[in-house]
Image (spheres, rainbow, N blue to C red):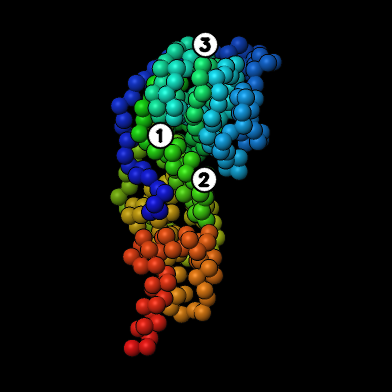
Amino acid sequence: MENRSIDLSFGLTPPIIYVRFQPKAPSMKAGKPVQPKDTPVLNYDEQKEASNLILPKSPALSSFHWHHWHFEVQQQPAHDTGDHRHQMHIVTMVTSGTAINQSIDGQRQSNLVGQNNAFILPAGALHRCDWQQDIEFMFVGIDPHVFVQVGQELVNPDRIELIPHFATLQDPLIQGILLTLKQELITPGINTNLFVARLKTTLVEHLLRSYGVQKVQIATYADGLPRHKLNQILDYIEAHLDCDLELEELAQQIGMSQFYFSRLFKQSLHITPHQYVIQRRVERAKQLLQKSELNLAEIALECGFANQGHLNRHFKRLTGATPKEMARMYKTSKTV
């Protein structure tokens, strides 16, 4: 796994302070919620700077190009957001301790929020938040349809609903994933799509299990992928190592959801799809070092690495030597 990765097995059952309540139902008209005209609804897939509707400053980092989910890092002065709603499920982590007043669907709470405390807002919940000093936070928004895609094989899709939580959660897995997403925005690589998709699936699975109205048990799989499907996907990966492969793309090749594909692939090979792709790219680089006249920058691109630096980092991590050192060894062995 890359150095930028996190251990996605830790913290799945963290000590959690739950604040459970039944949100107030919005007023209805013709079977649809009635939205106050002055209440902004933030749509991160369509509005490039949707958070500017409720915050005075633009985000320090933003992932507008990620479809069906969104990530931002914010640094804001004292402010009152006013009432608003999100079209996505929102998980926010406050990275600077401060006092926060919150209202979620009419329920109010004031908390002295510690560093890396998190809160959860279900899509459509009426939310308001204010603070009296500078604050830093990051949040991820996930389209409810992603929860249906992941959860439909785990729970009745009609009952996929998150429980709202105020900013009192200390959840190591949420912390790890959000901090990793921040790092991924700062230094993206050729494997960003595959890596980020894995984080998304892991986070959604965790939210369904720990914060869903209907709790789910994640099944284990003893047999992995059928041999013919495994061979099919391995051949596809081998033929597209120079591309920025996506988890959804791989799962579609054998007609599976991303969720099941990821789990069955790991059960089969004991590594994630992302780890496997990195290993195969390094193996191809070794072959090219031995047999081709390409320079290191050309080999990096031929093998699907973003640049020579990415090739060097992964190559040394997996082989113990740099590409240049390996090339020198190959030349020495030929002259002996």
Of the image marks 3 and 2, the number of the one nearer the N terminus: 3
Please tell me whether residue 299 is drawn above or below residue 245 in the rendered image.
Answer: below
Binning the other alpha carbons within 10 Å of mark 1 as few (below 14), some (14 to 19) or many (20 upward) gives many
Q: Nearer the viewer, residue 149 or 330?
A: 330
Q: Is residue 238 visible?
A: yes
Q: Nearer the viewer, residue 307 or 122?
A: 307
- x, y percentage for residue 228? 42, 62
**Mark 3 to mark 2 CA distance (whole Å):** 37 Å
Are circles 2 and 1 on residues that touch, CB within 8 Å? no
Q: Nearer the viewer, residue 199 or 212?
A: 199
- x, y percentage for residue 11? 32, 35
- Mark count: 3
The kind of residue on which mark 2 rests is Ile
Disc 3 is placed on an element classified as: loop
The kind of residue on which mark 1 rests is Ile
Residue 106 numbered tag: 3
Identify the residue at image location x=34%, y=52%.
267
Disc 2 is placed on an element classified as: helix
Of the image marks 2 and 1, the number of the one nearer the N terminus: 1
Residue that mark 2 sits on: 186
Identify the residue at image location x=33%, y=24%.
16
